[in-house]
Amino acid sequence: MPKIIDTEHTGFFRDPADGTVYRVRHNRRRTARYAEALLPAHPGIRTDYRGQAPLHTLTPDDELGPVSLLRFLAAQAPHRKCLFCHRPVEDPPSVTFGIGPDCAARHLEVPAKVLRVLHTRLDPPPDGGQPTPRAVRRGHLRLVAAYGRLIDAA
């Protein structure tokens, strides 16, 4: 099985052998990488340091895209803290996905408005889960539709 050779490769990976999701990151000095397992905790997710051992079995094909990561996080809801900055989350999409709006835009390149609409797609409100008029006015429907199709297909 090929290893992750690129020393700069970081992100979220799912181990195909046992289904564990890992966050691969650099150490503070950026001289080495390590893995943290994302484990369900009630509420939310806790991370467990696993060192470099998982890096020998993960491949670039095991990387989770933003949509797969959001689906994994939504299954572990509710969350109290942001996965990236560890600040408390309060708005409903952040509680569902465990990622604050600023971190979603910065780390996953998913705008906060798209995160809100995806939240309604995963857990539709009684009115049918239609996008808000504000999202329609600002022209985010195409982006929301693209992410929505990815979520439906995943």
Image (cartoon, rainbow, N blue to C red):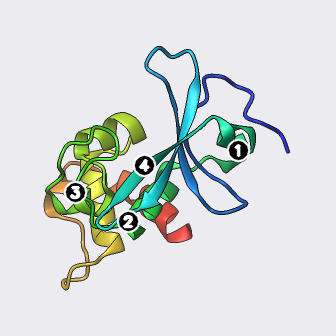
Instruction: Tell me, for residue 47, which label it has, or none.
Output: 4
Circles 2 and 1: CB atoms closer than 8 Å: no
Mark earlier in primary sequence (2, 4)? 4
Frontmost of labels 2 and 4 is: 4
- SS type, badge 1: loop
Circles 4 and 3: CB atoms closer than 8 Å: no
Report, in whole angstroms, how far the alpha carbon at label 3 lies from the one at label 2. Answer: 13 Å
What amino acid does circle 3 point to? Arg
- What's the residue at 18%, 83% (across, down)? 127
What amino acid does circle 2 point to? Ala
- What's the residue at 38%, 65% (across, down)? 74
Q: Where is residue 60 drawn, in percent x and y? A: 70, 41
Say which quadrant the C terminus sits in: bottom right
- What's the residue at 57%, 27% (across, down)? 33
What amino acid does circle 4 point to? Thr
Frontmost of labels 3 and 2 is: 3
Mark earlier in primary sequence (3, 2)? 2
Mark earlier in primary sequence (4, 3)? 4
- SS type, badge 2: helix
Q: Where is residue 64 drawn, in percent x and y? A: 57, 50
Q: Name the foreground residue: 34 vs 100.
A: 34
Mark earlier in primary sequence (1, 3)? 1
Q: Which residue is mark 3?
A: 80
Q: Where is residue 40 drawn, in percent x and y? A: 42, 64
- SS type, badge 4: strand
Q: Which residue is mark 1?
A: 58
Where 16 falls versus 60 (above or below)? below
Q: Name the foreground residue: 129 vs 45.
A: 45
Report, in whole angstroms, how far the alpha carbon at label 2 lies from the one at label 4. Answer: 16 Å
Q: Which residue is mark 2?
A: 74
Mark earlier in primary sequence (2, 1)? 1
Q: Answer few, some or many: residues within 10 Å of disc 3's Cα (few below 14, many 20 plus, some between 14 and 19).
A: many
